[in-house]
Image: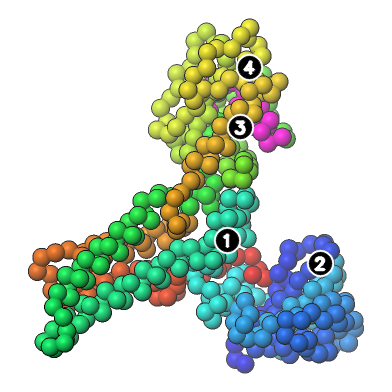
């Protein structure tokens, strides 16, 4: 009973049809009895009147559910109150919980952290849960769900189990090499197994960063000279007036971003200032920012007017660049089709669907991966790279003493353990769980 019991509103704040308030800890059962008068059978909803423990005033009538430890999300006793989503109802129940001894409001991510600390989920699954809450597209949702049902954490634990077997071979060579029933060649077998395991880890790392990029979304920069229709294109795709459009060159001076869902994949379209030489210091800064964003983008759409007598040379931004010829409605005829060149009219909509379809196909290809396990965070990648380096050292030939091989294997196992949270993760727990919303 020494650990505090925490409570929070677990649904979004504000007016709604339903609100869920969650309580977790040793006094959760007591909280339900104080507010509802009794505790319902485990995992069975009961419609009860909720009263303030001090005044006895009826606050609302709602469903009460009880999930006894250890078979709950947090591994502790958990009670949920499902009440009407009006602000007064929610405030009344929160006030009643605050009046109970031993209860306090939960911190961001505290429910999930307790679940991790009580072994209900590992650290990679907790991170996947955070990704699921933040998911805005179907692809992000699918990736998060894969992580919650195993993903990189399950793979890391499987690799650690194999490492334990390899370590056993080395330890047998160190401690029992003089025993008659211990076979010879244990170190050679250990090195061979370490190299095979390293190959498996390296194949996952070789898949690239598609999983990490999917969490953040692709960035597509719209660049080009002034008055080429960049801002009009962004407004057309966003289906709202995001950027001021005018016939005067230099209207757009800052970077404007719009997050979109194209075919279930996340993408951020970034409108930039027209690239030209200017004596205006503000416009110069806009041009500088435009170039910087283009160089950091995943794809650049270079806009220019179709039929221009002196076409702009596309700058080398160091990334994939598609040429977009806008304002074809002002030309007598289209130019010949060319690879990675799109002709359209933002004003009439002609050619717009073809460009968006190409963008969707590019997103699918960009986020495609064939590995059974996807790396979704830089933390996971760093741990795998460290584990791989230690495995490669352990698998080296020569006259390396078995004690050093054992140390390399131990370090590799430690790096893999950090993915699932088995070892040495205290310093990252705060940053991970603080990103959760309160009530989760």
Which badge, 2 or 3, is on the more N-terminal residue? 2
Q: What label sits on residue 18 in the rendered view?
A: 2
Q: Which quadrant of the figure has residue 63?
A: bottom right
Q: CA distance from mark 4 to mark 2?
A: 50 Å
Which badge, 4 or 2, is on the more N-terminal residue? 2
Q: CA distance from mark 2 to mark 3?
A: 38 Å
- Residue visible at 52% across and 17% down in the picture: 337
Q: CA distance from mark 3 to mark 1?
A: 27 Å
- In the picture of the structure, the residue carrying the numbered disc 1 is 145
Question: Is residue 413 within the magenta segment?
Answer: no
- Residue visible at 45% across and 58% down in the picture: 373
Element carrying mark 1: helix
Residue count near mark 1 (Cα–Cα under 10 Å), binned few <14, some 14–19, many ≥20: some
Q: Are marks 1 and 4 in contact (CB under 8 Å)?
A: no
Which badge, 2 or 1, is on the more N-terminal residue? 2
Which badge, 1 or 4, is on the more N-terminal residue? 1
Q: What label sits on residue 356 in the rendered view?
A: 3
Q: Are marks 3 and 1 in contact (CB under 8 Å)?
A: no
- In the picture of the structure, the residue carrying the numbered disc 4 is 327
Q: CA distance from mark 3 to mark 4?
A: 17 Å
Element carrying mark 3: helix
Q: Nearer the viewer, residue 432 or 164?
A: 164
Image quarter hosting the C terminus: bottom right
Residue 410 coordinates in the image, percent (x, y): 28, 74
Element carrying mark 2: strand
Which badge, 3 or 4, is on the more N-terminal residue? 4
- 262 displayed left or right of 288: right
Please determine whether, in this image, residue 261 is positioned above or below residue 2.
above
Q: Which residues are magenta?
A: 223-239
């Amino acid at each position: 009973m020494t650990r505090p019991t925490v409570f929070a509103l677990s649904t979004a704040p504000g007016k709604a049809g339903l609100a869920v308030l969650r309580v977790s800890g040793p006094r959760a059962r007591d909280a339900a009895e104080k507010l509802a008068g009794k505790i319902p059978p485990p995992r069975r909803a009961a419609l009860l009147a909720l009263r303030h423990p001090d005044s006895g005033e009826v606050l609302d009538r709602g469903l009460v559910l009880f999930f006894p430890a250890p078979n709950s999300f947090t591994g502790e006793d958990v009670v949920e109150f499902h009440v009407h989503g009006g602000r007064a109802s929610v405030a009344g129940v929160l006030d009643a919980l605050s009046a109970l001894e031993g209860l306090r409001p939960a911190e961001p991510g505290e429910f999930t952290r307790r679940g991790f600390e009580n072994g209900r989920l590992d650290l990679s699954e907790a991170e996947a849960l955070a990704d699921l809450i933040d998911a805005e597209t179907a692809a992000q949702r699918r990736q998060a769900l894969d992580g919650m049902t195993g993903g990189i954490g399950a793979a890391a634990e499987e690799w650690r189990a194999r490492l334990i077997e390899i370590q056993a071979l080395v330890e047998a060579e160190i401690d029992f090499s003089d025993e008659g029933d211990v076979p010879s060649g244990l170190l050679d077998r250990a090195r061979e197994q370490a190299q095979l395991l390293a190959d498996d880890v390296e194949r996952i790392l070789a898949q690239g960063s598609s999983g990490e990029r999917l969490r953040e979304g692709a960035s597509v920069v719209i660049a080009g000279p002034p008055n080429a229709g960049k801002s009009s294109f962004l407004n057309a795709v966003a289906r709202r007036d995001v950027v001021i459009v005018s016939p005067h060159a230099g209207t757009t001076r800052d970077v404007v971003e719009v997050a979109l869902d194209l075919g279930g994949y996340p993408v951020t379209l970034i409108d930039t200032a027209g690239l030209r030489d200017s004596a205006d210091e503000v416009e110069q800064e806009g041009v500088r920012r435009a170039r910087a964003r283009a160089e950091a983008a995943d794809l650049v759409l270079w806009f220019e007017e179709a039929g221009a007598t002196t076409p702009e040379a596309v700058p080398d931004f160091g990334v994939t660049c598609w040429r977009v010829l806008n304002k074809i409605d002002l030309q007598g005829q289209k130019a010949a089709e060319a690879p990675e060149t799109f002709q359209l009219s933002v004003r009439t909509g002609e050619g717009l669907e073809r460009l968006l379809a190409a963008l969707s196909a590019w997103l699918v290809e960009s986020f495609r991966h064939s590995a059974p396990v996807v790396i979704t965070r830089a933390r996971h990648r760093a741990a795998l790279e460290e584990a791989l380096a230690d495995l490669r050292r352990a698998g080296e030939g020569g006259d390396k003493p078995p004690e050093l091989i054992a140390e390399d294997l131990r370090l590799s196992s430690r790096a893999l353990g950090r993915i699932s949270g088995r070892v040495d993760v205290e310093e990252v727990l705060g940053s991970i769980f603080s990103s959760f919303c309160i009530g989760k």
